[in-house]
Image (cartoon, rainbow, N blue to C red):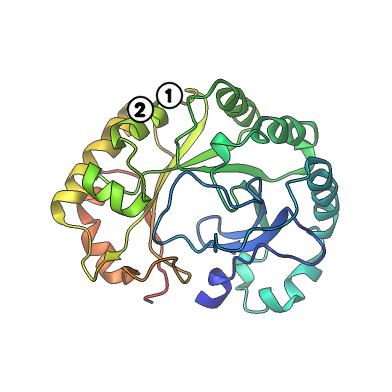
Amino acid sequence: MEDVFAEHNRSFLETRFIYPVISRRSGGLSLGINLDYDKTCNFDCPYCQVNRREIPEQAFDFQRMQEELHWAIEYLQSPEVFTLPRFKSTPENFKIWKDIAIAGDGEPSVNPHLLPTMQFLKTIASKLPQIVLISNATGLKRPKTQEALEILSQMGGVLWAKLDAGTQKYFEIVSGSKMKLQSIENRILSVPPSLRLCIQICLMKVNGVSPSAYEIACLQERLQRIHDSHRLESVQIYTIARPPAQTIVDPISLRELTTICQPLMDANLPVNLYSGAAD
């Protein structure tokens, strides 16, 4: 069954900017919108599966994305989608269109197409399931991103903000960035109070070593501050499910992940754990 969750190929039939996947964390089919078609990202996470050595020749086309989404709205109403080879192993309880995820091959919160996309989605909101914005949080304080978040909130959507570390040193390893981790936390705290908020955390072995108890303790402190300020809907903790960009990282088994994260669960944070390639 893990094979169906590992399939996150961005190409799908004749579409270029949208792609359906079976998502563990969504609990069904998630239709991705790839705003960063040119694979531009301000992080260089070692666990990322995006091949940034191969850059598409075409640029993002907003008009075509809208056309593709209109087509997908009709196509995904039919069970035909689950007869496709890429979805042949989909469990019965996952054969449902759960959400539209704005994610793709880069960071949407700093993408100039985020606000227009959110404005477009609002015009067809009655035809759509839940809207999810998946972000590394770096652009959440930008005025146009704040405007996009307000629209997301109005549609009852949810922000999945990444927070993969508790300490600056570990953050720099797992993000490939020198940005201050405290700045990431502050950006998450800046989102509109009315917006539904989830934190997503990818834990992994780095050079064969799992996150330390101290790292988890520091992460717990950050999560608690966010939870106290902006009630979290969930804390999604997962591990590597697909081949990573760098060989220094490996997945953690669900059993070990459960042990590592026990302090977070004991703190009554709304933790959900997801298995990966090690199971």
On the question of residue 83 being in view, the answer is yes
On the image, the x and y values in percent for residue 225 come to: 28, 31
Q: Nearer the viewer, residue 150 or 110?
A: 110
Q: Which mark is residue 199?
A: none
Local secondary structure at mark 1: loop
Q: Is residue 118 left or right of residue 45?
A: right
Q: Is residue 81 left or right of residue 192?
A: right
Q: Nearer the viewer, residue 139 or 90?
A: 139
Q: Label 1 is placed on what type of residue? A: Ser
Does 82 sit above or below residue 135? below
Q: Which residue is mark 1?
A: 190
Q: Quadrant of residue 119?
A: top right
Local secondary structure at mark 2: helix
Q: Quadrant of residue 254?
A: bottom left
Q: Is residue 221 left or right of residue 78?
A: left
Name the residue: 67% across, 74% down: 87
Q: Nearer the viewer, residue 271 or 180?
A: 180
Q: Which residue is mark 2?
A: 186
Name the residue: 85% across, 47% down: 67
Name the residue: 28% across, 70% down: 255
On the image, the x and y values in percent for residue 96 come to: 68, 60
- Please tell me how crowded label 1 is: few (under 14), some (14-19), or many (20+) other residues with Cα within 10 Å: some
Name the residue: 50% across, 56% down: 25
